[in-house]
Amino acid sequence: MKRFIGFIKKEFYHIFRDKRSLFILFGMPIAQIMLFGFAITNEINNVNIAILDHSKDATTQEIIHKIESSKYFTITASILNETEIETAFKKGHVKAVLIFEKDFSKNLGKENNATVQVIADATDPNTANTISNYVTAILQKYQQKINVAVKTPYQILPKTRMAFNPELKSVFMFVPGVMTIILMLVSAMMTSISITREKELGTMEILLVSPLKPFQVIIGKVVPYIFLSIINAIIIVLLGILVFNMPVQGSYFLLAAESVLFIITSLSLGILISTVSASQQTAMMISLMALMLPTILLSGFIFPISSMPLPLQIISNIVPAKWFIIILKGIMLKGVGLQFIWKSTLILVGMTLFFIGLSVKKYKIRLE
Amino acid sequence: MKEETAIHVKNLTKKFGAFTAVNTISFKVKKGEIFGFLGANGAGKTTAMKMLIGISTPTSGEATVAGFNVNTQPESIKKNIGYMSQKFALYDDLTVKENITFFGGIYGLTRKQIKDKRSQLVEELGLQKIVNELVSSLPLGWKQKIAFSVALLHNPKIVFLDEPTGGVDPITRRQFWEMIYKTANQGTTVFVTTHYMDEAEYCDSVSIMVNGKIEALDTPKKLKEQFKASTMNDVFLKLARG
């Protein structure tokens, strides 16, 4: 045991004397969560739009007021004719233009029909879509208001409720995602690099010739990273709660236990990577290509799995991050207990055992 | 096993697929001897050595190191040998003191033993000024000398040195060999691989490996007589050219 503590102490010297790994360890999580939380967002806020009002009557004024008073849009310009629309878009000042047809009020009163044209800048298709949805929603609300007096014979009114995230905050999606990426990055990449570094420097050989058993060497290298990853997980959850008002509906204990499980899954992947790569460079490339990309793209973190083509949906099942994100969302947003996430938990446990078994096998082959 | 034999190798073989890296080698190393294990790059020296220090399993054949069988008791061997590899044996980002503490620790020395050893080393090698410096800031010669001392921390019966003087200047090499002599005089067997043929002259016995086989095995003096050569370098060239 005393040998072991000496070993771990040495490992911490390595980590704390290497500015680069320190930065990855503690700078990255904070930077990422801030970036994802503040900058990358699916919501729209204060989007600049322009209005081209051909009728300029009471109704259009009322609608324009409604749009302006919502926090989503800021009306920056009034456009006088059609030719100015393109210029406005090209200058990039506005993201959408609303065009009210001539005699809007009159048409609405006489023919029960009036048109608003929404032209959105679709160089950014997601934003364009969201803008048109929001405008439509505002118009519909207005329509319902003026329709109260007149009773229409048939009407289907959908009443939507956004469960678990009523305000549709995208940060609720990013916190579990970023936590998954960071734990994966720190645990898998850092351990695989630190083990291959010993191989590269030749010190691994010295350790293997010492009375320390190979598994003691590996565990000694891994333990500090378990410790640091737990600290990282705590930082991320705290930032989520304090800065972004991310709720944790379920049990903190379950959240901690599942996080430790995922950390161990990632570490076992890191060990596996270190057994197949001879240099730090290789370890880093494999970690980035084989772990980071699937973790970001195929885990359901950014792109929903259900809308992927079938082959990718199938592949997504072997990405550990997918299951951890399901678990995290379950605990943090839905407040579920183990009875709802035992399947994902079991899959992670199975993956971990598989990776460890495979590394042991690879390791033995290499020794012989 | 007689007490005077430190290493006893019999028909040791290592194959990697169809390639035979070490081909039925046999030799004995006496206790307290400096044994030079020579050969060109790729002759199989390092592979043979790895089997002796217990990190590689022989394909066939027998060997005992410090009285323990390499096939069945590699863990006991590890406790009784020291090893210094041709790459660095010390951690660059640790200080000299931390390195000594760490390696003493993994060999199971108590805190007091480590402290005593450390003061002894500082005294002997004159490390007073650099003991708290990072190893990366030291010149190569110093690193090699400290690495050698670290390999001897736990008083091993045999110390294996894998090309310890590679890339070191002649003066440091000289000093290094003085340390080797001193160690051997204290009763520790020294098993050293090298491709500097002048160093072979310093050894008590020498074996020369060519393509996985031991082609010559005797004292430097007798080898020179046998091959009618004036230096070990000539002996080696005659052997290597066939």
Image: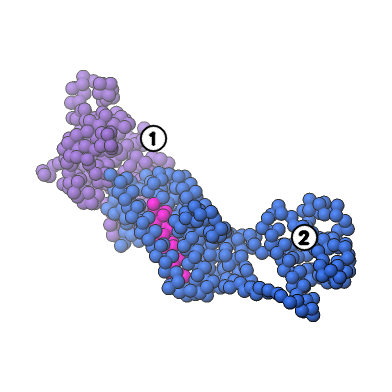
Chain colours: A blue, B purple
Percent x, y for residue A363?
33, 49
Please report the bounds of the magenta region as a residue range: A255-272
Q: Residue B214 in the image: x percent, y percent?
A: 21, 30
Decide: few, some or many residues near mark 1? Use Cα within 10 Å; few <14, some 14-19, many ≥20. Answer: few
Q: State the image coordinates of residue A144 (x, y, percent, origin top left).
A: 75, 75
Q: Is A338 rendered above or below residue B108?
A: below
Q: Which mark is residue B167?
A: 1
* Element carrying mark 2: strand
Q: Nearer the viewer, residue A359 or A49?
A: A49
The amino acid marked with disc number 2 is Val
What residue is pinned by disc 2? Answer: A118
Decide whether residue A270 is among the magenta residues.
yes
Q: Identify the subunit bearing mark 1.
A: B
User: Do we see residue B165 in this rendering?
Assistant: yes
Quarter of the figure that contains the C terminus of chain B? top left
The verdict on residue B236 being magenta is no
Residue situated in front as seen by the camera: A22 or A9: A22
* Percent position of residue A15, x then y: 46, 55
Does the image show residue A221?
Answer: no
Residue at far front of view? A153
Quarter of image, res B105: bottom left
